[in-house]
Amino acid sequence: MAQHNELGEKGEELAVDFLLQNGYEIMERNYRFQKAEVDIIARQKDVLAIVEVKTRSTIDFGNPQDFLKPKQIQRIVKAVDHYVTTNKLDVEVRFDIIAIVKSGKTFEIEHLENAFYHF
């Protein structure tokens, strides 16, 4: 497996652990709809947190959250709309980013709530 894929998988594991430690229930991981993949769908009370995980080994080229493109956001929003409708959920939907940067042997985790909005 390519090193960046391993880093991405490690980042998602860290993000799930972080969310669980902060009172979230993990509803779905790697939810796919059409061309979109939603990394994590988590719930905390009446809020459905749609979490995009961005993991990087360095910030030399920018912060992890800077790598989310408008087209990707549109696909995620469409996938989440499908998920909420299909599951008949009555919740507030929030789009978050968990940015993870590897620092030596440790990882720095930043949870950005309401990181992006519907277009």
Image: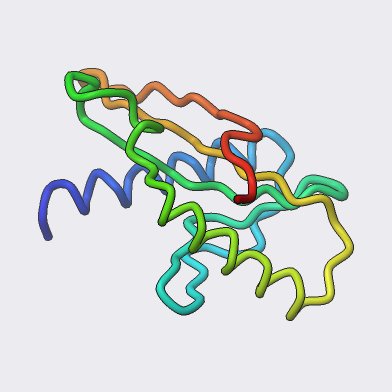
Expressed as whole percent of the image width and height from the top left, the position of residue 90 reads 89, 63
- Residue at 83%, 68% (x, y): give it: 89
Q: Is residue 12 left or right of residue 58?
A: right
Question: In the image as oriented, which residue stretches furthest toward the left?
Answer: 2
Percent of width and height locating residue 56? 26, 33
Point out residue 76 in the picture as x, y percentages from the top left corner. Answer: 52, 60
Is 25 left or right of 111, judged from the image as shown?
right
Q: How many marks?
A: 0
- Residue 21 position by quadrant: top right
In the image, farthest residue toward the front = 119
Q: Residue at x 52, y 69 (%)?
A: 31
User: Which residue sits at x=78%, y=45%?
Assistant: 44
Question: What colouring method underlies this structural image?
Answer: rainbow
Q: Is residue 78 above or below residue 57?
A: below
> Quick one: quadrant of the N terminus?
bottom left
Residue closer to the observer: 12 or 119: 119
Describe residue 10's horizontal placement relative to residue 44 as left or right: left
Rendered position, 102 above or below 37: above
* Residue at 68% over, 34% down: 22
89 above or below 67? below
User: How far across and down, in percent of the image, does residue 43 sit?
Assistant: 74, 52
